[in-house]
Amino acid sequence: MQAVLYVAHGTRVAAGIEEARAFVERVKKRIRLPIQEMCFLELAEPTIEQGVANCVAQGATSIAIVPILLLTANHAKEDIPDAIEPLKARFPHVRFSYGKPFGIDRRLILQLFQRIQESHEKLTEDSEVLLIGRGSSDPAVLRDFTEIATRLKLFFGVRNVNIAFLYGNGPKFEDYVANLQQNRAKKIFIVPYLLFQGLLRKHIEKTIAEAEVEQQLVICESLGYGNKVLDVLVERTNEAVVNATNINNEVIIHGFTSRKQSIYRATGEAIK
């Protein structure tokens, strides 16, 4: 029996956990499968191991792992598959497949622009936008985030869209703030590219509050769990289920499917 296991990042902030759970409950209503469970990569329970066990207890023989992650980085490429690998020995009758993170998607860019509009501040020619990402050591994140900023600029005619990260590779948020005195923009819309802000938003607000600048700084709501974000996860889940069906058919025909083949289909990247 086919199951879906949604894997969220996790946080120590209780409100963040509840928001993620509520979001997944909305997704479940649009997925026609009887077995749908949720777990967290870190900092919260159920863990991935507990999530898999919950699926198996309900009769799952095939589990599609769906990451609730914005971009493809080490969490999707390594951490989640590494957590699943030892469970294959514990549940040898279960086949695992991997779905894709949200990635670059027009609907997410529309959601970003909606966050700017919700600020009720006018986006003028002398305004610019700063997208703030969580950050990663994976260079693919910098590449994809730059593409998202470029598309936001082109789709909506924004004069300038910059990016910054709270940690990891790429331009740093603190450096951007430190250099604001040299920035000629009169108004800057700051949009956290995060599903849940929590402590990270507090850090952003504190850094902005301590900055001595002349510009008007507008801190918008995060990308969050809006309807357009919901649509993307529903699509990624359906893709993962189809991928699982294809893999299961290969198992029947050929007798085996490797872990690398599963990840290849999930990420679209060449196997090295």
Image (cartoon, rainbow, N blue to C red):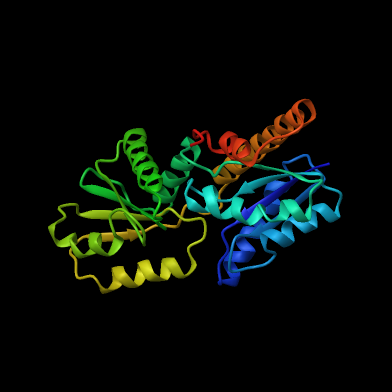
Q: Is residue 198 left or right of residue 248?
A: left
Question: Quarter-wise, where is residue 263 in the image?
Answer: top right
Give the image location of residue 132, x and y in percent.
Answer: 36, 55
Q: Residue at x 14, y 62 (%)?
A: 181
Asked whether residue 254 appears in the rendered view, the answer is yes
Taking the spot 20% from the left edge, 65% from the top edge, the residue there is 178
Instruction: Looking at the picture, tell me which residue is in the foreground, 259 or 122.
Output: 259
Q: Image point 80% across, 29% down: which residue?
A: 252
In the image, what residue occupies the spot 42% across and 66% down?
201
Give whichever of 24, 239 is nearer the camera: 239
Instruction: Work out which residue is located at the far top of the displayed protein and give it.
Output: 253
Relative depth, front residue between 206 and 94: 94
Q: Position of residue 40 (x, y in %)?
A: 63, 61
Q: Is residue 23 visible?
A: no
Q: In the figure, residue 50 lies in which quadrant?
A: bottom right
Residue 138 falls left or right of residue 181: right
From what the image shows, is residue 67 above or below residue 166? above
Number of numbered labels in the structure image: 0
Nearest the eye: 69 or 137: 137
Residue 147 locus on image (x, y percent) = 36, 39
159 relative to 185, above or below: above
Q: Position of residue 224 (x, y in %)?
A: 51, 54
Position of residue 40 in the picture relative to residue 93 (left or right):
left
Residue 165 shown left or right of residue 184 in the figure:
right
